[in-house]
Amino acid sequence: MLRRPVISEAAKQLHEDCLVFDLHCDTLLNQSLLGYDVTKRHTNRLPLSPFLFHADIPRMKEGGIGAVALGLVVNPLRKRSALDATRRALGQVRGWEQSAPDDVSLVSTADDIEAARAAGKLAVFGGLEGAHGLGGHVEPLPELRAKGLRYVGLSHFSKNLACTPALGWRSNNVDPLTDHGRDLIDGLCHERILVDLAHINKPGFLEAATRATRPVIVSHTGVRGAHDVWRNIDDDQLRAVADTGGVVCIIFAPVFLSAGLRGTCDGVVKHIQHVINTVGEDHVGIGTDLDGFVVPPKDFPDISHMPRLTHLMLEAGMKEQTIRKALGANMLRTFREVCG
Ligand SMILES: [Zn+2]
């Protein structure tokens, strides 16, 4: 058993004082696959624990999380029923508030996030992972927004009617957005839903960032300047996001952060620093991807350990103001600009 990693008093205090905003957590998968009760505190259980069982409401609160985007994953083989699957997943997000009304608030705006934090509640909303979950439609966006959808990732692991992924079924690094993909970006900007560029190939990524009329995000990614693998984005892509005023959120999956499978949380700090060195401190955030079939860092077995990141950022000599921005202030600013 790993000893509980060190977290200084200064780090604990600073962490508590900051809004911590996780832009991508896949805990809904635990619920749909395993009937997991998110209101109960779980511990990691073998043999699935390296991939799942990383988060629930009690551990999110222990980890000082103020706001979290819950990933909506829709099976790409569903065609006509894709929209219904997305609606059902949004119902699951609402279920968090219904099952724990004293601890969770389903939020619409940046003010709602701040109000939830002031009331000691966890702010939640939905982020769709892949435009296939819209089934080729743009018209339902207002309805889905009203049900809690606040970002749409254009791509996941398969080519869809909007775009091509960086890896997965029919992926390539050539195809641009489709006409539907362009309409979708226009529709998302019009409806004030964030455009998420995680998983998409580079031509689609750059085109989407240029076309969007509001700041864009990458909800969970590493950066090639810190570790050069397919899943990560390069400096051109970083600059394209920064040019929109948006935020790149760093993933907590050592496999994308450093060589070797079980790195530590230092990898997250290294990637945060690369974003800061390349485009400044206003365009970086966090998107853990916990519960998304990723193995978390050795010193970060679950989301309750989030203050560890603050500890390591302080140890790395980062200023309080910079840490505050990376933990959540940048993302809150972008959320306000786009979603209201
Ligand atoms: Zn993902």
Image: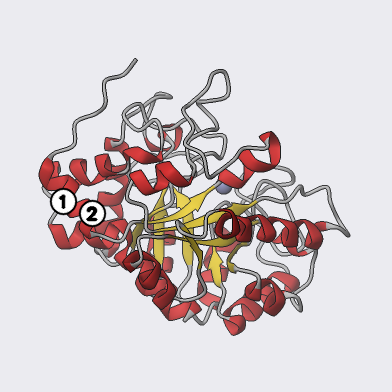
Q: Residue furthest top?
A: 1
Residue 227 at what x, y percent from top left?
A: 37, 39
Instruction: Say whether residue 169 is visible.
Output: yes
Residue under numbered circle 2: 16
Which quadrant of the structure image shows residue 4?
Answer: top left
| Front residue of 79 and 227 | 79
Examine the rendered structure and indicate whether residue 124 appears above or below residue 253.
below
**Residue drawn at the location 34% of the way across and 45% of the way down:** 63
Q: x and y percent of residue 21 in the render?
A: 38, 58
Residue 16 vertical position relative to residue 182 in the rendered view, above or below: above
Asked if labels 2 and 1 touch by Cβ distance under 8 angstroms, the answer is: yes
**Tag 1, which secondary structure?**
helix
In x, y percent, where is residue 340? 47, 81
Q: Residue at x 69, y 61 (%)?
A: 131
Residue at disc 2, secondary structure: helix
Front residue (pair 46, 339): 46
Residue drawn at point x = 35 percent, y = 28 percent? 263
**Up-down: is 131 above or below 37?**
below
- Rendered image coloring scheme: secondary structure
Q: Which residue is mark 1?
A: 13
**Label 2 crowd (10 A; few <14 / some 14-19 / many >=20):** some
What type is the residue that disc 1 sits on?
Answer: Gln
Q: Position of residue 235 (x, y in %)?
A: 37, 56
Left or right position of 278 against 80: left
Give whichever of 55, 204 is nearer the camera.
55
Q: Is residue 263 left or right of residue 291?
A: left
Q: Is residue 254 left or right of residue 88?
A: left
Amino acid tagged 2? Glu
